[in-house]
Amino acid sequence: QVQLVESGGGLVQTGGSLRLSCATSGRTFRRYDMGWFRQAPGKEREFVGLVWRDGSTFYPDSMKGRFSISRDNAENTVYLQINSLKPEDTAVYYCAASSNYGQAYDYWGQGTQVTVSS
């Protein structure tokens, strides 16, 4: 069992930056590929990107440029850096752990709220 706990969300002005953290329990963090997702009110969950267990990253085209994911295996933590925040980035951000290269996710965190004021 892996527990994921996100933190770092909050209220930020347009143009600001945030770094979200996702701390994981257990000693198997290195075995998982870690993804970030977000869900805005009334919208479907959206894939932000992932960091594979080797540290390489993938972002969909819509997320390239302002989002950056990294991981610290020594701290069992994955990070999501968001720059130049826009009101449309307002959402609950979730991290998730995948044992099969991001094809499906085995564990999810509870989410952290990011609100961007205009």
Image (spheres, rainbow, N blue to C red):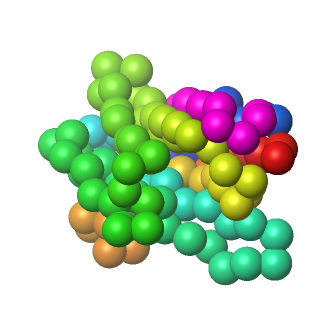
Q: Residue at x 73, y 78 (%)?
A: 43
Nearest the eye: 114 or 94 = 114
- Residue farthest to the top, as pictured: 74
Describe residue 65's horizontal placement relative to residue 15 as left or right.
left
Nearest the eye: 44 or 29 = 44
Residue 107 screen position, x and y as percent: 52, 58
Describe residue 17's horizontal placement relative to residue 24 as left or right.
right
Residue 89 screen position, x and y as percent: 66, 55
Query: Is residue 22 part of the magenta span, yes or no?
Result: yes
Query: Is residue 57 part of the magenta span, yes or no?
Result: no
Nearest the eye: 32 or 62 = 62
Magenta range is: 12-24
Name the magenta segment's main secondary structure. Answer: strand
Q: Residue at x 35, y 36 (%)?
A: 70
Residue 118 screen position, x and y as percent: 82, 47
Q: Residue at x 77, y 35 (%)?
A: 13
Task: Specify the quadrant of the image occupied by residue 41.
Answer: bottom right
How many labels, in total? 0
Instruction: Note whether 102 is above or below 117 in the view shown.
Output: below
Instruction: Note whether 112 is above or below 78 in the view shown.
Output: below
Q: Residue at x 67, y 50 (%)?
A: 86
Q: Is residue 95 visible?
A: yes
Q: Is residue 108 visible?
A: no
Instruction: Note whether 81 is above or below 95 in the view shown.
Output: above
Task: Specify the quadrant of the image occupied by residue 5.
Answer: top right
Describe residue 74's horizontal placement relative to residue 41 as left or right.
left
Residue 90 screen position, x and y as percent: 74, 54
